[in-house]
Amino acid sequence: MRTLGSRYVLLGIIATYVLVILGPGENASAPVRVAILGALLAVTVRARRASQGWAGAALGLGVVLCAATVLVGLSGSERAHAVLAGSATTLLVAGMIVAVGQAALTSRAVDGATLRGVLSVYLLLALLFGAVHQVAGQFVDGYLHGVQGPPDLSTALYFSVITLTTIGYGDITPGCDVARAVAVTEALVGQLYLVSVVARVVSGYRTPDTSDPSRDEP
């Protein structure tokens, strides 16, 4: 269950990235994104052998947030919809980071599932800060240079990945003190995560011993 859960979560995160980048638009894609993240949170909780009640609660939270996103989208207020969708994404992704991170760091063996968990957390960090940038951009004028109006999640995720990986800004840069503060925090979190968590996990990785009949098979 742990191995299958880590695979589903990583594939779901990749699918979420594709939806954000290539989706039909925020109004149409936001409810789908929230639904996917809610389902992934439930899978993550269930994969940790937590009680079925917690997994059901996670799924229920995703359903409620998805329905709220649809209803607010129908109201016609783009700002309210962007704030709710970004906040829902932030909440669900934060829950996934905690659940996946705990599973990866408390694993007794550093195996493929652990590596997928560590990679999932890194991708989730970019998505988390992307949602934060999206929400903050709704309240702060000129939040990002190179963007007309408040950024949608696709633009915010692009800026977030550039910031987290610290490869250097190009067409989009922070446009105010709030954006700079969030960007600095994100860059520090990303680098500390790479040099501490990822380095520790990778250094302890070992391939499965096929000669050991007692090893845990998926």
Image: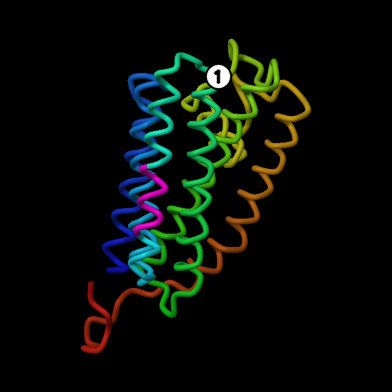
- Horizontal side of 173 relative to 74 (left or right) equals right
At x 60% / y 22%, what residue is drawn?
Answer: 170
| 58 shown above or below 79 | below
Judge by depth and name the residue closer to the eye, 176 or 61. Answer: 61
Q: Is residue 62 magenta?
A: yes
Q: Which percent across, then down, holds residue 148?
A: 58, 10
| 160 shown above or below 125 | above
Q: Is residue 96 magenta?
A: no
Which residue carries the number 1 mark?
79
Q: Which percent across, then down, holds residue 41?
A: 39, 53
Q: Quadrant of the N terminus?
A: bottom left
| 49 shown above or below 45 | below
| 71 shown above or below 55 | above
At x 49% / y 27%, what residue is drawn?
Answer: 153
- Horizontal side of 95 relative to 71 (left or right) equals right
Residue bounds of the magenta highlight: 56-63
- Horizontal side of 10 relative to 133 (left or right) equals left
Q: Amino acid at mark 1?
A: Arg
Q: Which percent across, then down, holds residue 117?
A: 42, 60
Quadrant of the rendered image containing residue 210 = bottom left
- Horizontal side of 193 relative to 93 (left or right) equals right
Quadrant of the rendered image containing residue 180 = top right
Main SS, magenta region, reads helix
Name the element at disc 1: helix
Count of numbered badges drawn on the protein: 1
- Label 1 CA crowd tier, 10 Å (few <14, some 14–19, many 20+): some
Q: Quadrant of the C terminus?
A: bottom left
Judge by depth and name the residue closer to the eye, 28 or 70. Answer: 70
At x 41% / y 78%, what residue is drawn?
Answer: 109
